[in-house]
């Protein structure tokens, strides 16, 4: 079997020369903007009832206000990420944050449904590539041994921002009116957008600064885009993540309805409990990322194996929960399952980073975002709803976790080809029998 100690992205440590303190400052600001991103996106959900009454809107119109953002993210994430890779990530992130914040302010000033729809369209344009470009910045300023941890922590910001956007937006709407809900989210984003380029400098984090170090990756220097799709493992990583996202997305969307129907909770109480489960997803992703990084120190394959454990573990726990009667035991098992269901996020991002050229990391993560939406976030809630119409929501919930078995199978496929593909990306294949030294390299 072919082995190689690292990928192209690993051989050139993009964190060289970046002080750890500065790296953490970059993380905090980038993480803060991700929270702003999702607060601006999700605050709309908190004021649905008010807009419905004030503007006499139907549920379909309200749904379009939310869906237009997701649509623009899906359509624009890859082209905008490619532009960011080419013209500078710091500059691009700043422009994105300014655009979605100003568009959110436009939501606060909207006088009718049409103006609100245009403003939400622009929110989607601004947010389209932030997640992929932001995570590319984060993984570039920390050592590769921390990739899964930092990627997991960063992506947990999406869940935290969603919870804060809904809860804070709802509280502000009650006290000051719905317009101030949007305005407060916009002001938060504008402040961070102003601070970001003053503190985060392109010259300190851009991959181009590594040219002075001398590149060992000349074999792929002229065709970095090929690494986005040039190996079996990287394509399978996109697919595996999408399949597991199908489970996570379905559970998160339908959890409030499950608590409402089977626990007899009101909408408010069901929403709060569902919010707790979302926080479990975020916290679990961080913990699983940390565990993955720790376990992977001794073997480059361990993070792939951990992904299999997270997939099968979440499936088992959710399946056990759904054969229990409603009550504390079931809630505990559901919570434990939610801790693991997003556990693959960090390790998968680390795997893709290792298999792709550092110059196109933002584009690689954009491709991951696209597949997650196409295979997971878009069809998951829809298919679950259709099955619920036929069999009931409880039966649908029993079937959804089985998708994790398919995800685990794809991760097993990745494990079988990962080391060969790492060697292929680097272009320096070393053929040898498996040795302890070869297996102890970091990935």
Image (cartoon, rainbow, N blue to C red):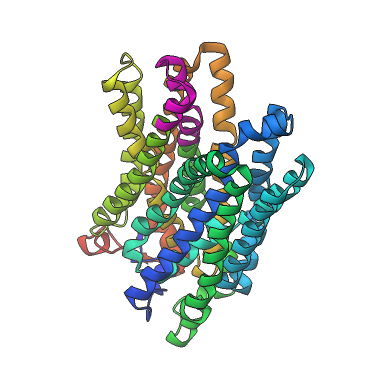
Q: Nearer the viewer, residue 184 or 409?
A: 184
The residue sitting at 67% across, 35% down in the picture is 51
The residue furthest left is: 436
Q: Quadrant of the C terminus?
A: bottom left
> Which residue sits at x=43%, y=85%?
213
On whether residue 251 falls in the magenta region, the answer is yes
Outermost residue, bottom side: 212
Q: Report x, y in % for residue 152.
A: 39, 52
Please state the horizontal and vertical placement of residue 417, each as a whole percent of the image.
41, 51
Residue 224 position within the rendered picture, expressed as x and y whole percent measured from the top left: 56, 68
Is 196 on the left or on the right of 323, as rendered? right
Instruction: Please state the extent of the stretch shown in magenta in the rendering.
Output: 246-272
Q: Is residue 42 above or below residue 349?
A: above
Can you see residue 404?
A: yes
Q: Residue 248, relative to residue 319: is it above or below?
A: below
Closer to the camera, 213 or 40?
A: 40
Image position of 176 (left or right of 266): right
Taking the spot 69% from the left edge, 47% from the top edge, the residue there is: 120
- Tell whether 1 sits left or right of 77: left
Q: Image quadrant of residue 58? A: top right
User: Image height check: is 426 above or below 116?
Assistant: below
Whether residue 111 is in magenta: the answer is no
Question: Across the whole image, how many numbered discs are drawn on residues?
Answer: 0
Residue at the image point whose x is 46% and y is 56% from the top? 352
Task: Please identify the dominant SS of the magenta region.
Answer: helix
Quadrant assignment, res 87: bottom right
């Amino acid at each position: 079997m072919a082995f190689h100690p690292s990928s192209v992205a690993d051989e050139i440590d993009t964190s060289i020369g970046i002080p750890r303190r500065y790296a953490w400052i970059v993380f905090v600001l980038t993480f803060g903007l991700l929270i702003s991103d999702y607060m601006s996106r999700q605050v709309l959900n908190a004021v649905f009832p008010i807009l419905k009454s004030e503007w006499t809107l139907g549920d379909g119109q309200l749904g379009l206000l939310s869906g237009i953002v997701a649509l623009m993210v899906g359509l624009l994430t890859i082209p905008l990420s490619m532009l960011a890779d080419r013209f500078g990530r710091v500059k691009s992130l700043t422009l994105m944050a300014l655009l979605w914040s100003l568009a959110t302010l436009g939501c606060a000033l909207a006088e009718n449904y049409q103006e609100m729809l245009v403003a939400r369209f622009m929110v989607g344009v601004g947010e389209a590539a932030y997640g992929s470009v932001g995570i590319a910045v984060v993984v570039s300023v920390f050592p590769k041994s921390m990739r899964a941890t930092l990627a997991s922590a960063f992506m947990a910001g999406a869940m935290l921002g969603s919870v804060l956007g809904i809860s804070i937006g709802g509280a502000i709407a009650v006290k000051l009116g719905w317009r101030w809900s949007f305005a407060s989210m916009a002001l938060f984003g504008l402040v961070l957008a102003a601070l970001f380029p003053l503190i985060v400098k392109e010259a300190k984090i851009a991959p181009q600064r590594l040219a002075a170090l001398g590149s060992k990756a000349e074999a792929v220097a002229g065709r970095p885009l090929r690494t986005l799709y040039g190996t079996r493992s990287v394509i399978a990583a996109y697919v595996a993540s999408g399949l597991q996202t199908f489970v996570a997305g379905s559970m998160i969307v339908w959890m409030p309805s499950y608590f409402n129907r089977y626990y007899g909770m009101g909408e408010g109480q069901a929403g709060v409990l569902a919010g707790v489960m979302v926080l479990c997803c975020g916290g679990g992703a961080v913990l699983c990322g940390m565990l993955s990084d720790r376990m992977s120190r001794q073997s480059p394959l361990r993070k792939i194996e951990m992904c299999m454990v997270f997939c099968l573990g979440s499936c088992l726990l959710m399946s056990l929960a759904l054969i229990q009667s409603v009550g504390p035991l079931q809630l505990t098992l559901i919570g434990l399952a939610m801790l693991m269901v997003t556990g693959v996020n960090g390790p998968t991002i680390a795997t893709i980073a290792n298999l792709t050229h550092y110059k196109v990391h933002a584009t690689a993560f954009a491709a991951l975002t696209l597949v997650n939406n196409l295979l997971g976030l878009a069809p998951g809630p829809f298919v679950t709803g259709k099955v619920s119409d036929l069999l009931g929501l409880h039966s649908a919930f029993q079937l959804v976790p089985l998708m994790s078995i398919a995800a685990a199978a794809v991760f097993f496929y990745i494990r079988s080809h990962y080391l060969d593909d790492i060697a292929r990306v680097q272009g320096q294949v070393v053929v040898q029998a498996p040795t302890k030294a070869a297996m102890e390299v970091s990935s």
